[in-house]
Amino acid sequence: MKIGKLTDYGVLVLNHLARTGVNLQSTEEIATATGIPLPTARKVMRTLVDAGLVLARRGAKGGYRLGRSPAQIPLLAIVEAFEGKLTLTECSSTESDCEITEQCSLAGNWVGINQVLGMVLAGISLNDIRHPAGLQRLADSFKSSNEHIHLVSID
Amino acid sequence: MKIGKLTDYGVLVLNHLARTGVNLQSTEEIATATGIPLPTARKVMRTLVDAGLVLARRGAKGGYRLGRSPAQIPLLAIVEAFEGKLTLTECSSTESDCEITEQCSLAGNWVGINQVLGMVLAGISLNDIRHPAGLQRLADSFKSSNEHIHLVSID
DNA sequence: TGAAAGAATACCAAATTAGTATCCATTCTG
DNA sequence: CAGAATGGATACTAATTTGGTATTCTTTCA
Ligand code: SF4
Ligand code: SF4
């Protein structure tokens, strides 16, 4: 129930790019600004570009910049860029790495939970991550909707 | 962004105990019923007992049964029993395993996200896991509250 | 008192992840 | 056009975590 360090680094980088705006940032600039070791930073950038979250310009005077506004980058996209589709368990449809999938009575019951988790992460934007104040209000809004949740839970 | 297999096994066991009710189940019964290898099942039971989620009776004719009603066992409790307090990143207050915590500008910004995630998992009970129908309604309720979330996100 | 359980500890093997190094392809600049 | 500055791609290694197993002790019932 953690995100990988690379994912975390990804957020770090996106945060930096959000600050620097349209000015292209080289891998080295990013590495020193964030504290991420240079070779690792390369790998991170690769992933972010592949996911379309940042744009790259190659050649001399090249570098990276955000692909969209920070408000339009959901945490879900960042996580899934680094770790693949969000699934808490192994029994994710086709590729069932789980040995006991056959025997398991609640193999399919996780899809709903994955969906809920996904919606939550989709509702958190890079901006929310950067501005703790907004996050606090987000947390509060959930607290109130918790009553709703418990109503739904049947016994 | 996955739960460990042991955690998953924990849910499996709890599900089984929810079915068998007050009848004490031995480790071997649990292992065969769930498909979990016997030695591993022992470890799982240990964790569940330590967390207070199941009660153990030792000696001959001993075994395990649920400690509380399935509706009162939140997924959050199960996860935290196996994986410790829910934190997406390493910078969890005191024990900062992260090398660049000093330099990191958003080290503290994750607490809010962890809280939100925790609330969500706290709102999902063992019953919700066992009954997919209820889960679907849960997902729907979130979909509607998503508007609210986006309103909060500032740009 | 002995058999049937769970408790505790320690250990090993496998998988995943983080991190590094190296070489190639592109673009700007003069 | 040449060369320097950059990102792209690939492959490898090391560290950590996780899953899984074995062994021995303690408790309880019949
Ligand atoms: S099949 Fe059952 S045991 Fe295997 S991963 Fe899915 S839920 Fe967990
Ligand atoms: S300190 Fe910054 S980099 Fe280190 S774990 Fe926390 S968020 Fe990630």
Image: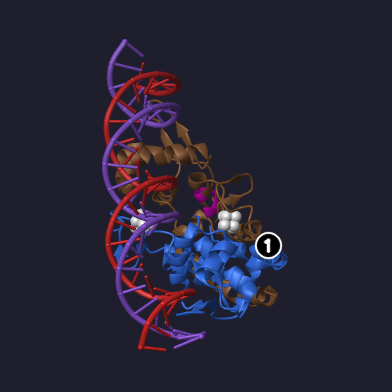
Chain colours: A blue, B brown, C purple, D red
Bin the neighbour count of mark 1 within 10 Å (Cα to Cα): few under 14, some 14-19, many 20 and up.
Answer: some
Picture residue at 51% right of the left edge, 45% below the top:
B81
Picture residue at 63% right of the left edge, 74% below the top:
A20
Between B155 and C24, the one nearer to me in the picture: C24
Which region of the structure is painted magenta?
B74-79
Picture residue at 55% right of the left edge, 53% below the top:
B76
User: Which residue corresponds to mark 1?
Assistant: A143
| The stretch drawn in magenta includes residue B152 | no
* Rendered position, A93 above or below B20: below
Q: Is residue A124 visible?
A: no
| The stretch drawn in magenta includes residue B78 | yes
Name the quadrant containing residue B2. Answer: bottom left
Picture residue at 36% right of the left edge, 37% below the top:
B27
Name the quadrant containing residue B43. Answer: top left
Magenta residues: mostly which secondary structure? helix
Asked whether, in this view, residue B41 is left or right of residue A37, the answer is left
Asked whether, in this view, residue A89 is left or right of residue B116, the answer is left
Q: Is residue B41 visible?
A: yes
Image coordinates of residue B123 in percent, x first then y, are 58, 59
Between A93 and B11, the one nearer to me in the picture: A93
Element class at badge 1: helix
Image coordinates of residue B112 in percent, x first then y, are 65, 60
Chain assignment, label 1: A
Name the quadrant containing residue A147. Answer: bottom right
Image coordinates of residue C11 in percent, x first then y, are 33, 31
Q: Amino acid at mark 1?
A: Lys
Between A101 and B59, the one nearer to me in the picture: A101
Image coordinates of residue B99 in percent, x first then y, are 56, 50
Between A63 and A50, the one nearer to me in the picture: A63
Asked whether, in this view, residue B104 is left or right of residue B28, the answer is right
Asked whether, in this view, residue B60 is left or right of residue A23, the answer is left
